[in-house]
Image (spheres, helix red, strand yellow):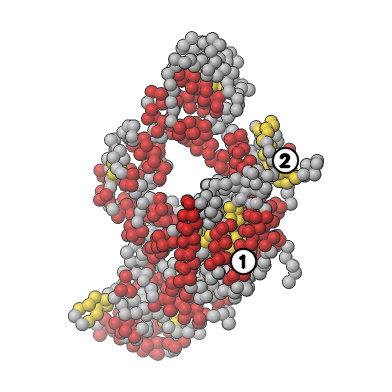
Amino acid sequence: MARLDVQQKLEILADAAKYDASCASSGSTKRTSKGGKGIGSVTGSGICHAYAPDGRCISLLKILLTNSCVFDCHYCINRKSSNVRRARFTVEEVVALTLDFYKRNYIEGLFLSSGIIRSSNYTMEQLVEVARQLREVHDYRGYIHLKTIPDADPELVHQAGLYADRVSINVELPTVGGLARLAPEKSAARIDGAMARMKSDIIDTKDARKKYRHAPRFAPGGQSTQMIVGADSANDGDIILRARGLYDDHALKRVYYSAFSPIPDASSVLPLKRPPLMREHRLYQSDWLMRFYGFAAHEIVGATDTATGMLPLDIDPKLAWALQHRAQFPIDINRASKSMLLRVPGLGVRAVQGIVSARRWRMLRLDDVARLTVSVAKIRPFIVTPDWRPTLLADRADLRVLLAPKSEQLELFAG
Amino acid sequence: MSTPATTGNDRSGLSGPPAGAIRTITLAATDDFDGWRSAARALAIADIAPDRVEWRVDGDVGDLFGETVEPPPVTARSRALTAPRHFIDLARQAACHRDPERFALLYTALWRIQRNPGFASDRADPLMQRIEGLAKAVRRDIHKMRAFVRFREIEDDDGTQRFVAWFEPEHHIVRANARFFVERFANMRWSILTPDLSIHWDGETLSETAGAIRGDAPGGDPIEDVWKSYYASIFNPARVKIGAMMKEMPRKYWKNMPETALIPALVAGAQAREAEMIAEAQQSAAAPGSNRSGAWQALRREAQGCTRCPLHRCASQTVFGEGPVDAALMFVGEQPGDQEDLAGRPFVGPAGQLFDRALIDAGIDRGATYVTNAVKHFKFVARGKRRIHQSPAVGEIDACRWWLDQERALVLPRVTVALGATAARAIFGKAMAIGKSRSRPFALSERAEAWVTVHPSYLLRLPDAEKHDAYRAFVDDLRAAAQRVS
C-alpha cells in the first residue's frame, strides 16, 4: 500500500470518527492564552465553527489516532472484520493538525479517540502523549476531549484526565444483551467500573483543589458517554431509565444518543436501515426535560406508549406528558410556581424566567405571554391569565390533534 | 472609548436649549455605548423626556438643520440615577445593533426605569421586548463572528507570519469582539478586516484601522484544502438535515467560509451514498462466508431477555423463529399458544399440526422454510388451570415488530407469507383485510414479496361444513406462494 499523506489519513480517520455524536466544547474552566507561549482559550460556552449538512456542529477536530482495531464490534465501521481502508496518524501529525486548524479558527479543540492497537495500554499511552505534547510542548490552552479505554491501566486513564477538559467512555448500547450480541469483546461491567473510577477521580481532585490552590485539575469538563439507538431491542423507556441511572451513578455531564446509521461494509449481524432520527430527537428532548425542566425519569417513561414503551414521534414528550395529566392544567401564569411553569408545553426555560421576573411587577396578560414565547397557540390550552381562560379548549378530547404539528417533520426522504 | 463633546461633570455653564426644544446628541462612533451612557445619564437626571432628544452618530448623514447640543450638566445637587446592572449589560449589547433607533430606544427605557424600577425586569413589555431582540441579534452576531472568522496565513515583509481574516458582520460588533480574539490568539499576530473597521494584534497591543475590502485580505491558504477534506469526511450522508444546518449557518455567511463550497455536492450525493451502503450490506449478508447463523444465534439469545412489552411478565419464554437462516420462504404466524410457550418452538400446538399437514399437502418441506411469529410471547388469561389465548394488541405487535424486522433482515426471504391479520399488520405496518388481500403477491422490494392468507387456527374454529373448502383455499395459497421461490 502506498504511503498516505496527512490529508488522505485525515479523510479516513475523520470518516471513522464521525459516528461519535459528541462535539461539545463547553463546560470547562475558563482560560486564555495571555501570558503564555501558545494559543487557545476556553470561554465557557462552546462555539460551533461550522455545520455539516447533517446538521451537526463542528467545533472540534474529531479524529481517531488509528482506525485499526483488535475488537470486532458489529455496529462499528472500524471493527476488525471490516474492509475499510486503515490508516494511522503519528502523535506529531495530530498535534500539528490541531494547531494548524486552531490557528485558522476552524475549530476550538481536539476530540481524540482511537481503535485499539497492540494493547489497551499502548493505545491509551499514545492518546495521552498527544494531549501531553499539546499542553506541555506547545502550551496549547484550547479544549481537549479524550476518549478513554475501559481496559487501560487506571494510572494512564488518570493522566488523560490531567491533560483533557473532558473524558468519555461510551456505554455503546442501552442493554447488556445488546452489548453482548453486538460488541462481544466489551463488557458492561468493565465500562461501568471505568466510569465509576473516573467519577471518583473527578471528585477527589475537586476536593483537593478546595484545599490546595495548585492541586492539578482533572477533566474539569467532566465525563460523558454515548448510547446507540436502534441497534438493540431497547425501547425509549429503557433508554431513558438507563440514561437517568448513568447521570446518577457516574455524575455524567452528558449522555449522547446516536441513531444507528448505515456504515460502509456493514456487519451482517446488524441489518442496515435508515437511522431513526426523529426517535433520537425525542430522546434528546426527554434528556432535556430531566436535566433542565425538573422531570423525573419515571414521569417521562409514563408518557411512553404502555405497550411499546416508545415515546410518540408526532408530538414532543413534554406535550405528551401534559396531555396525560390534563387535570393539573390549566395553570395561572401569574401565580403558578416556577417548577409548574416549566411543565407547560411550549414554555422554555428562558420564557419562564421572563414570566417570573415580569410578574413581580405587574399582572401578565395573554399578550405578554405571547411576547415571551415563540407560539402562544400551543400554550393557550394549558394556561390562565386575567384575560384568558381555556374553558372549551381544555376539555376537548381532540386536543392532541389540535396541538400536533401539522406538517410532517419526520425524515427528509422517508422510506 | 470616546465620550460626547461634553460630559456629565462639566460645569462650563452650557445649559443647552430651553426645556421643550429638541436636543441632538452626537455620539463618537456607531458602537459608542459609553458616550450614550454618560449623555443618557445627564439627560435623565435633568428629566429630559425621550421625545425631546435626538441621537446621532458622528459622520451620519443627519438633519442638516439640527444643531449638536451637549447634554445638560450634572451638578452636585442632581438626584441620583440608578439602573439595574442587567439593564446596563443589555443596553451595552443592544447599542451595537445596526438599528438607527437603538440609542433612542435605550434612552426611553432608561427614562421609564426612573419612573418604575420594575420596568427593567419586564421582558413582556413591548419596548423591553424590542431591546431584548436587538441585544439577542447582537449576541448572535458576536457569536457567529467568533465561529466563522477564517484566518489565512501570510508572510509579512520582515518574514514573520501573520494571520489575516476578512469578515462581514451584520452589526457594529468588531470592537466588542476584539477581546475574544486577543485572548484566544494572544501569541499570534493577526488582523481581522471588515467593511467598517479593521483590528490588528501584534502580540502586545491591539490597534484599529479603517474599514477594508475583501481584496485586502489574502485569497487562500494551503491548509484550507486539508480543512475541506475534514469537513467532507466528518459529514454523515445517512443523516442529512439541511434545515438544521441552514438555521445555524445561514447562507449569508457562506461566501467567506471555504468549506461551504462543498455543501451542494455533499447534499446531492448523500442519498446515493446511503443507498449504496444498504445495498452493499444486503449483498454481503447474502454472500457465502458471512456469519449469518452466528448473528441469528446472537439475536435469538438477546430475544430471550426481551422486555419491550409487558407480555414477557406472564409468558414462560420467548418463542423465537426457527429454520435455515438463508431460507427463501418465511412464514409469519400470530403468536405462540399454550403449547408453543412451554416448548419454546413456533407452530407445535393444534394450529401447528394443521399447518404441518397443509404444508405437506402443498408440497412444501417445512425444514427448508423459516417459521416465526409476529409476537414472540404468549398472551393469555388464566381460567382455572387453563390459559386462554388472547389476541395481541396493536401496541404489542408494534413492540415486537423490532424482532421480526431483525429476522427478516437477516434471513432476507424472497417470499414472506403472513398467516392471519396479526402477521399482516406486522409485515405491512397497517391493518389488511385478509379476504381482499389473499392469493396474490405484494412487492416489498425489488427482490422480495409478501403473501397474505388465513391463520391455521381460523380453520380450526370454522363449522365443519365450511372447513373443507377453507382448508383447500389455504393449501392453494401456500402452494402458490411456494411456487414463487421454486
Between A390 and B173, the one lying in front of the other is: B173
Relative image position of residue B192 (x, y in whole percent): 67, 39
Relative image position of residue B263 (x, y in whole percent): 62, 53
* Separation of marks 2 and 1 at Cα, in angstroms: 42 Å
Position of residue B17 in the picture relative to residue B276 (left or right)? left
| Residue A12 seen in the figure | yes
Residue at the image point whose x is 56% and y is 39% from the top: B141
Q: Mark 2 lies on which chain?
A: B
Between B190 and B459, the one lying in front of the other is: B190
Q: Are marks 2 and 1 on the same chain?
A: no
From the viewer's perspective, is residue B435 above or below residue A316?
below
Between B323 and B215, the one lying in front of the other is: B215
From the viewer's perspective, is residue A197 above or below residue A340?
below
| Residue A69 seen in the figure | no
Position of residue B101 in the picture relative to residue B187 (left or right)? left
Check disc 2 and report its element: helix, strand or loop.
loop
Q: Which mark is residue B233?
A: none
Amino acid type, mark 1: Glu
Check disc 1 and report its element: helix, strand or loop.
helix
Relative image position of residue B175 (x, y in whole percent): 61, 34
Occupied quadrant, residue B274: bottom right
From the viewer's perspective, is residue B1 above or below residue A300?
above
Q: Residue A125 carries which label?
A: 1
Q: Quadrant of the N terminus of chain B?
A: top right
Amino acid type, mark 2: Ala
Residue at the image point whose x is 51% and y is 28% from the top: B102
Disc 2 target residue: B217
Residue at the image point whose x is 48% and y is 19% from the top: B43
Residue at the image point whose x is 51% and y is 51% from the top: A212
